[in-house]
Amino acid sequence: MVLQNLKFHHIGIAVSDFEKIASYYYSIGYKKFNKSIIRDELQVVDLILLIHDFHPNIELVKPLNERSPINNYLKSSDVAIYHFCYEVDSFSDVIKELKKNFRVFNVSKPKPAILFNNRLVAFYYIHGVGLIELLKK
């Protein structure tokens, strides 16, 4: 199975503190995409997108409050790989193909993502793989 029209976009990293981890990424040449921290009330997180000329984009994801889904990822560590994000033409086409070979669970229905100019994002958990984010092109 080869998924068509699936383009890697970024790695999401759950963090409890932006400065500690961001300083590492700055030291290896990453820069902030946005000037300030982006607050996404719908996702219940604060976000920083880091970009690099040669390395993959990194999205730092910090819980906004105790209701944030990120808190579960940070129970045993102050930083954890959270998800991999892919740009897609169609959520349903990609999920239909994935379900042919994997157990796929919808975690979050499509909603606008402020960090990506309100493009729709949806989260899915793939058993044996982990969490992915799909970003509508």
Image (cartoon, rainbow, N blue to C red):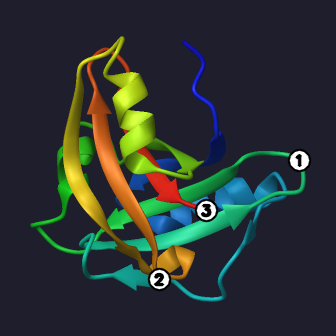
**Badge 1: how crowded within 10 Å, few (<14), some, or many (20+)?**
few
Residue 123 located left or right of residue 80: left
Return the residue found at the far right.
Answer: 53
Q: Residue at position x 34%, y 55% from top?
A: 122
Q: Amino acid at mark 3?
A: Ala
Q: Amino acid at mark 2?
A: Ile
Image quadrant occupied by the C terminus: bottom right
Observer-nearest residue: 21 or 109?
109
C-alpha separation, residue under disc 3 versus residue under disc 2: 15 Å
**Badge 3: how crowded within 10 Å, few (<14), some, or many (20+)?**
some
Label 1, on which residue? Answer: 54
Residue 104 located left or right of residue 134: left
Callout 2 secondary element: strand
Q: Position of residue 56 (x, y in %)?
A: 73, 46
Label 2, on which residue? Answer: 38
Q: Position of residue 110 (x, y in %)?
A: 30, 62
Callout 3 secondary element: helix
Observer-nearest residue: 117 or 51?
117
Return the residue found at the far bottom.
Answer: 35
Q: Quadrant of residue 39?
A: bottom left
Observer-nearest residue: 39 or 108?
108
Callout 1 secondary element: loop
**Badge 2: how crowded within 10 Å, few (<14), some, or many (20+)?**
some
Label 3, on which residue? Answer: 22
